[in-house]
Image (cartoon, helix red, strand yellow):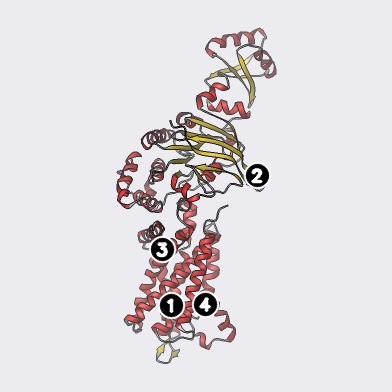
């Protein structure tokens, strides 16, 4: 991996009136990495990616993509990037091929290279046999793959994927992941994606930035993020919560105790060896518990660690209706 | 160079989509044919020199047929907004003016195709077209179609929904048609109507078509063509400016 920064974000802010969608964000993305922006719906992911793609203008601060300023050198940025939007942006009444040809013309891909390149990208996403079918007859997964192929036509340096697997079934999701990993290798490209699926960030990304309420609260490789919060998570359901918290926090191997959604989260090192000691301590204090489970740390635990809430909370509480649920399919 | 290719690509998309949906051609003939045949027959007692009423309104009907179709082509932008295609096109490294021109020329071309079919009905009602009047008619039809397609796109860039577009569309199409003198001679109209009609861009298209096809007009053809061109320029520049403004 190269050490050059292909994206540099400096104090980027976007306000809508009183609402601060992206709040003074700064970070870098290295050339060649798969970088993920992980956060709940409404955290500012799409706003941030839209500014980097020159779709939205920042309120203040700036960013450079491939060395070009996103405000002053808009066209150069646009030529350097490929974008797959959260919502489908294909023309359903054209064939896959016609959609891709339109894109190639808009991005000025030289005519003599075009055919070869179109064949290459269609093959990359496994759609070479389906290119002459109207897009309205494509499945959700095929549409996504076509959009990814289309975004690659003009040899972008950075590929932006906004929620690349939203609204897809689990099997198709894994299928899209495989294509993303494959193209990252084959195309030698930097990938910047947003997601609210922790497994997605975990599986795909070299580095992850966790974003909540417009602010980046942690940024590192998934492994380091998980290591930093300290070991495995014990999730205890019981009546006497305060007492349990007191008891377990005295144990030497317990790193952190917190309460989320009425459950107690205990971060401990080496859960395999230390779990019996936890039971013992609870029994010695006559505490009854309803259930206990052990979880290897996930990025969700990282999110809980930094924000005190779960990523999926935001969706279920309906703070914001996810866009994919209201869009027309 | 790449801008011209982009305009061409956007134009081509409109044509492909139009071609796949040829049936909509039929709908656009109903209104002009009703005017020409039913209205024409009903008023057959009206004479303009050697011209009967059908022959008199024919050039205006051709112009008029372009208005509805051209303005309606703006709905393609609403469609694009709804299905996300608009975002994909707006984020391409090309100017908004090129996007606008591609769209406007696409809308104008489809309107022109439909207008040409109406124009070809000339022989049915004994209106003679020679090479000169045919070529100049097509030119006037082209700039008319372009002007009203630009107007349609301008409206589409101001509203985000099909319903919103429909409301504005129905609000302006009929006044544009009725005030233009397409179905009556403005030369005998009361003074207030003459004045109001001068603010209707279609008036100039109708006048120019009449001048060319039946040699009957009250505004000179040069003035008419100039006004249509100026209106096109205004509508397309304003439209391109409003097109996909950033928030």
Q: Quadrant of residue B122?
A: bottom left
Label 4 marks a residue whose chain is B
Image-quadrant location for residue A169: top left
Number of numbered discs overlaid on the protein picture:
4
Residue, x 36% and y 83% (percent of image)?
A: B125
Judging depth in this view, the residue of B218 and A186 nearest the camera is: A186
| Residue A191 image position (x, y, % from top left) | 45, 37
Q: Secondary structure at mark 4?
A: helix
Residue under mark 2: which chain is it in? A
**Residue assigned mark 2:** A19
Q: Secondary structure at mark 1?
A: helix
Tag shown at residue A26: none
Residue denoted by label 3: B106
Sequence-first disc among 3 and 4: 3
Q: Which residue is mark 1?
A: B61
Does residue B45 sit above or below A187 in this rendering?
below
The residue closer to the viewer here, A133 or A5, is A5
Q: Nearer the viewer, mark 1 or mark 3?
A: 3
Q: Is residue A290 left or right of residue A324?
A: right
- Say which quadrant the N terminus of chain B sits in: bottom left
Question: Which x, y percent locates residue A209?
Answer: 54, 33
**What is the distance, in whole Å, between disc 4 and disc 2 at their CAs?**
48 Å
């Amino acid at each position: 991996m190269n050490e050059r920064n292909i994206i540099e974000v400096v104090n980027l802010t976007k306000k809508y009136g009183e609402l601060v969608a992206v709040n003074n964000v700064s970070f870098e993305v290295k050339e060649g990495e798969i970088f993920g922006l992980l956060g709940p719906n409404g955290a500012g992911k799409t706003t941030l990616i839209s500014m980097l793609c020159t779709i939205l203008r920042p309120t203040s601060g700036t960013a450079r993509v491939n060395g070009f300023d996103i405000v002053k050198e808009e066209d150069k940025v646009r030529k350097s990037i490929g974008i797959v939007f959260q919502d489908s942006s294909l023309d359903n009444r054209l064939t896959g091929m016609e959609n891709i040809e339109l894109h190639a013309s808009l991005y000025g891909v030289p005519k003599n290279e075009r055919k070869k390149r179109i064949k290459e990208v269609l093959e990359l996403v496994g759609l070479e046999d389906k290119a002459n079918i109207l897009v309205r007859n494509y499945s959700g997964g095929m549409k996504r793959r076509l959009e990814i192929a289309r975004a690659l036509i003009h040899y972008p340096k950075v590929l932006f994927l906004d929620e690349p697997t939203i609204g897809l079934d689990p099997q198709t999701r894994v299928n899209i992941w495989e294509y993303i990993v494959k193209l990252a290798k084959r195309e030698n490209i930097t990938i910047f994606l947003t997601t609210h699926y922790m497994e997605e960030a975990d599986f795909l990304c070299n580095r992850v930035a966790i974003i909540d309420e417009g602010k980046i609260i942690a940024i590192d490789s998934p492994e380091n993020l998980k290591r930093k919060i300290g070991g495995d998570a014990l999730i205890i359901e019981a009546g006497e919560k305060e007492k349990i918290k007191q008891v377990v926090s005295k144990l030497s191997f317990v790193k952190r105790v917190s309460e989320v959604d009425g459950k107690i989260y205990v971060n401990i090192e080496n859960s395999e060896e230390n779990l019996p000691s936890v039971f013992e301590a609870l029994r010695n204090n006559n505490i009854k518990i309803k259930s206990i489970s052990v979880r290897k740390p996930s990025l969700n635990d990282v999110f809980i660690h930094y924000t005190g809430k779960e990523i999926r909370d935001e969706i279920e509480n309906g703070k914001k209706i996810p866009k994919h649920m209201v869009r027309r399919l | 160079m790449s801008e011209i290719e982009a305009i061409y690509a956007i134009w081509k998309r409109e044509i492909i989509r139009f071609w796949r949906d040829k049936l909509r051609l039929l709908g656009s003939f109903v209104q002009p044919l009703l005017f020409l045949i039913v209205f024409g027959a009903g008023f057959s007692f009206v004479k303009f020199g050697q011209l009967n009423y059908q022959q008199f309104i024919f050039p205006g009907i051709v112009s008029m047929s372009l208005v509805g179709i051209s303005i309606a082509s703006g709905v393609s932008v609403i469609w694009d907004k709804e299905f996300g295609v608009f975002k994909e096109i707006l984020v391409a490294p090309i100017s908004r003016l090129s996007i606008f021109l591609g769209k406007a020329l696409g809308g104008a071309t489809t309107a022109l195709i439909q207008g040409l079919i109406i124009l070809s009905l000339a022989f049915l009602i004994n209106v003679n077209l020679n090479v000169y009047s045919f070529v100049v008619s097509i030119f006037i039809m082209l700039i008319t179609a372009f002007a009203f397609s630009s107007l349609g796109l301008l409206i589409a860039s101001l509203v985000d929904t099909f319903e919103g577009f429909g409301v504005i569309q129905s609000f302006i199409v009929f006044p544009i048609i009725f005030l233009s003198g397409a179905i009556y001679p403005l030369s005998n109209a009361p003074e207030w109507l003459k004045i109001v009609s001068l603010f209707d861009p279609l008036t100039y298209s109708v006048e120019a078509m009449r001048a060319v096809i039946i040699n009957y007009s009250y505004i000179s053809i040069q003035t008419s063509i100039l006004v249509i061109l100026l209106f096109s320029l205004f509508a397309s520049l304003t439209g391109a400016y409003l097109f996909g403004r950033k928030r």
